[in-house]
Image (spheres, rainbow, N blue to C red):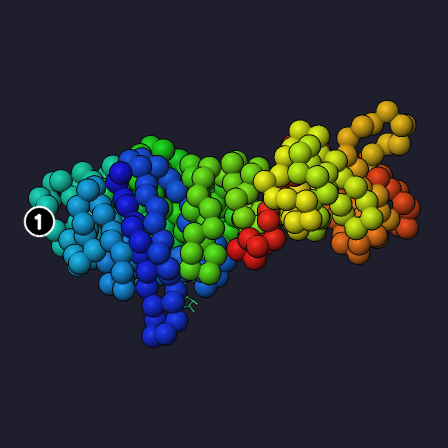
Amino acid sequence: MTLEVSGLTHRYGSKTAVEDVSFSLADGEIVGLLGPSGCGKTTIVQAIAGHLRPAAGRIWLRGEDVTRQPPERRRVSVVFQEPTLYPHMTVGENVAYGLEAREIERSRIDELVETHLELISLASRRDAYPAELSGGQKRRVELARALAPEPDVLLLDEPLSALDRSLREELRRAIGHIQRETGVTTLFVTHDQADAMALADRLVVMNEGAIAGVDTPRALYGSPPTPFVASFLGRSNAVEATVVEPEPLVLAVGEQTLTLPEARSDRPAGASVSCHVRPADLTLAESDGTDTAPTLSGAVSHVTDRGSRYDVSVTLPTDETVVVERQAEPPPLGTTVTVRVPAAKVTRFGTDTAGK
Ligand SMILES: Nc1ncnc2c1ncn2[C@@H]1O[C@H](COP(=O)(O)OP(=O)(O)OP(=O)(O)O)[C@@H](O)[C@H]1O
């Protein structure tokens, strides 16, 4: 493991910001640390970089316990959300800045600057000043500056969130390219699930100072471990149900029955479960009588035209509303429709975990 965070806990006064957080990054991995504002992401970055001493827990870099080491002793580079280039220094001087504090020969510094400016396709702008660069170029120079000391771990703390959409796309691609080229172990911190899913090999999803799930983006999206992960990683419909029979699974949703023939529940008859399913996995059934998939009936209560598709809201007799993605023209408001619920796409949670 290149980076290991173990049992990290931190408090600001009486406020617990991070509680018993553990995760690790393998060599060359890019991991997304993802969660809403205030969940503790920056606190974790600061602890890894050495800018705060955690109340409990350990940080390991390449097998060495660095928890009590000052920032300059750690081979960690950080790129922050706000631009931090020195305006009075050229691009080349900015990239060399972190190297000059170390005892590195001038010729080696020049070589590292050259290599990293080539990496970000800005070798020809070595003598330019930051004010002469576009926003995207400036951010790329910051990446080059962070990478030039050849850190063990690169920490990217919300590097895209202050950018407009097209610049964001450009820089997202640049980060992916640079990370693949250098193979630098990277922790990419963001509150934006699209950025995290596009870039990361694995995600560490945080909520309220604790880890809510760790896995590949696809696994967390397809089989979320908690309701929080289900709703934070893309849109999710939640329907409350009661177990009628655990195996094969029969659920009651209000007066309706939903039979999921392939599924079984480890919760007994009478238990409450929360069922989550993605809008893209639901369809409006064409009632030709041959369809045997589990279904729920409701009335079309709202339609949003998204340009490439419609989001059709269907309100069930329980007053819960589910959204169904649909390409074809939707039925008029008020129409009673049957929603097809593919059993394999339903994630169930016992309601005792519903808030986590
Ligand atoms: N210096 C501080 N003093 C008191 N409370 C703090 C301090 N810094 C952070 N907190 C609190 O600790 C919690 C975690 O904050 P942190 O900045 O780590 O979260 P975050 O996920 O990075 O949020 P954001 O995305 O908004 O930066 C929040 O509730 C925050 O209000």
Residue 133 shows in the view: no
* SS state under label 1: loop
Q: Nearer the viewer, residue 168 or 288?
A: 288
Q: Is residue 209 above or below residue 349?
A: below
Position of residue 198 measured from the top left corner of the image (x, y, whole percent): 49, 40
The quadrant of the rendered image in which ligand 1 is seen is bottom left
Residue shown at 35% from the left, 46% from the top: 23
Residue shown at 11% from the left, 40% from the top: 107
Residue projecting furthest to the bottom = 13
Q: Nearer the viewer, residue 157 or 229?
A: 229
Position of residue 237 measured from the top left corner of the image (x, y, whole percent): 68, 48
Position of residue 278 measured from the top left corner of the image (x, y, whole percent): 66, 42
Q: Is residue 126 above or below residue 39?
A: above
Quarter of the image with the N terminus is top left
Q: Is residue 141 above or below residue 179?
A: below
Residue shown at 38% from the left, 67% from the top: 16
What residue type is disc 1 on?
Glu
Position of residue 128 measured from the top left corner of the image (x, y, whole percent): 31, 50
Left or right, 59 with reference to 238: left
Residue projecting furthest to the front = 269
Residue on which disc 1 sits? 103
Q: Residues within 10 Å of mark 1 (few under 14, many from 20)?
A: few
